[in-house]
Amino acid sequence: MLIICPTPIGNLDDVTPRQRSALEGADLIACEDSRRTGKLLSLLGIERQDGSPRLVPYHEHNAQEAADELVGELTRGRRVVLVSDAGTPAISDPGYRLVRRAVEAQVEVSALPGPVAAMVALSASGLPTDSWQFYGFAPTSSDGRVATLEEAEDAKMTSIYYESPKRIEALLEDVVRVCGADRAVCVGRELTKMHEEYVRGSAGEVRREFAGRDSVRGECVLVVGPGVADSGDSADIEVDELIASMLDAGCRSRTIKDVVSQVHDVARSEMYDRIDEVRQQSGEGPNGG
Ligand code: SAM
C-alpha cells in the first residue's frame, strides 16, 4: 500500500495522529531529502530500529529509478509512505509520478489529509473560494509570468501561485501590468510559522508594500482574486436590479415577491428581507409598501 502523508509546512504541531502512525508503521519512507525527513522523525520521537523504516530518496532527479524500486516493494506487499520536504506530497512536487506508477501497478493508494500552502493561503485570503485555479510555481521569466497571468486577467475564479521571496515583487509587478493595479490580491508568507503574515489589498498596494522592504524572507503564496464577478454574484446583482426597478415602478412588496421568485432562483421566504435591503440601499426606509 502507498500512503501519501503530508508533513508540516512550518509548525510541528500540525502533525496529526494518523500521519504519525503512518510514519511509525512504514516499511519504507519515500522522501525528497532523507536528512530532512530523518530530522522530522527524530523531532516526532519516532525511532528507527536497525534502519527501519528505510528512507528512500525520491526527488526530481531520480524519480524514474526510485519509482522502479518503490513500485517493486509495493507489489511485494510492503507499506510505503510518501512524504515531501513540507506539505502534501504530489502537490507541486514529483510525488504524483510515483502515485501514477502505483495506480498503474494496481497497488492500493491512500492519502492522509494535511497542510497544503495554497489552501492555507486561499482560506485566509478573504478572496472568493467557491471556485479557484492552482498554477503551482509561477514561471521564472517575465514573459512566462505575463502569459500565465493573462489567464487570470479575466478569470471568473481566484488564481493561486507559489513563488519564492526573491521574485514575489516581480510577480506582483506583472500582476499590476496584466490584471491592473486594482485587482484584489493576498500574499501569504511564512504560513503556520512564527512570523506568519498575510498582506491583502489591491495589487498596486501590495506591490508597493513589498517594494518598500529591504528584503523579503520566507516562502510565499500569491492569491489573485477573480477578474469578473462569478455567476453567483452576477445573479445576485440581477435580482437586486429587478427589485429596485419594480420598487421604482411603485409595485407592492407582495407583487415583487411573486414576480422575482418566479423569474430567479430565490426562495419566497427570503424575498421580504431582500426587498427591505434593496429599499434601504436606495435610501428608502424598510417596509415601505
Ligand atoms: N507540497 C507543498 C504544499 O503542499 O504546499 C508545496 C511544495 S512546493 C515545492 C514549495 C512552495 O510551497 C514554496 O515555494 C512556497 O511557494 C509554498 N510554501 C510552502 N510552505 C510555505 C509556507 N510555510 N508559507 C508560504 N508558502 C509556502
Image (spheres, grey):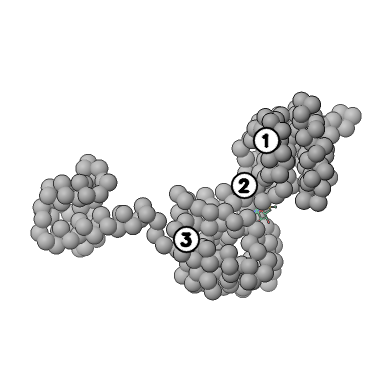
- Residue labelled with disc 2: 116
Asked if residue 33 can be seen in this view, the reply is no
Quarter that holds the N terminus: top right
- Picture quadrant where residue 213 is located: bottom right
Looking at marks 1 and 3 on the same chain, the residue that comes earlier in the sequence is marked by: 1
Q: Residue at x 44, y 58 (%)?
A: 156
Do the numbered discs 1 and 3 sit on residues whose CB atoms are within 8 Å? Answer: no
- Picture quadrant where residue 49 is located: top right
Give the residue at the far front of this rendering. Answer: 104
Q: Position of residue 264 (x, y in %)?
A: 25, 49
Q: Looking at mark 2, is its residue's CB closer than 8 Å to ligand 1?
A: yes
Kindly state the secondary structure of the residue where label 3 is placed.
loop
Q: Looking at mark 1, is its residue's CB closer than 8 Å to ligand 1?
A: no
- Mark 3 or 2: the one toward you: 3
Between the residue at mark 1 and the residue at mark 2, the CA separation in whole angstroms equals 22 Å
Between the residue at mark 3 and the residue at mark 2, the CA separation in whole angstroms equals 23 Å
Q: Position of residue 17 (x, y in %)?
A: 66, 31
> Label 3 amino acid?
Ala
- Mark 1 or 2: the one toward you: 1
> Label 2 amino acid?
Val
- Picture quadrant where residue 27 is located: top right
Q: Residue 103, which numbered label?
A: 1
- Residue labelled with disc 3: 155
**268 or 71, nearer to the observer:** 71
For residue 5, above or below residue 276 = above
Looking at marks 3 and 2 on the same chain, the residue that comes earlier in the sequence is marked by: 2
Between the residue at mark 1 and the residue at mark 3, the CA separation in whole angstroms equals 33 Å
| Residue 173 left/right relative to 201 | right
Kindly state the secondary structure of the residue where label 1 is placed.
helix
> Label 1 amino acid?
Val
Q: Residue at x 77, y 51 (%)?
A: 60
| Residue 155 left/right relative to 13 | left
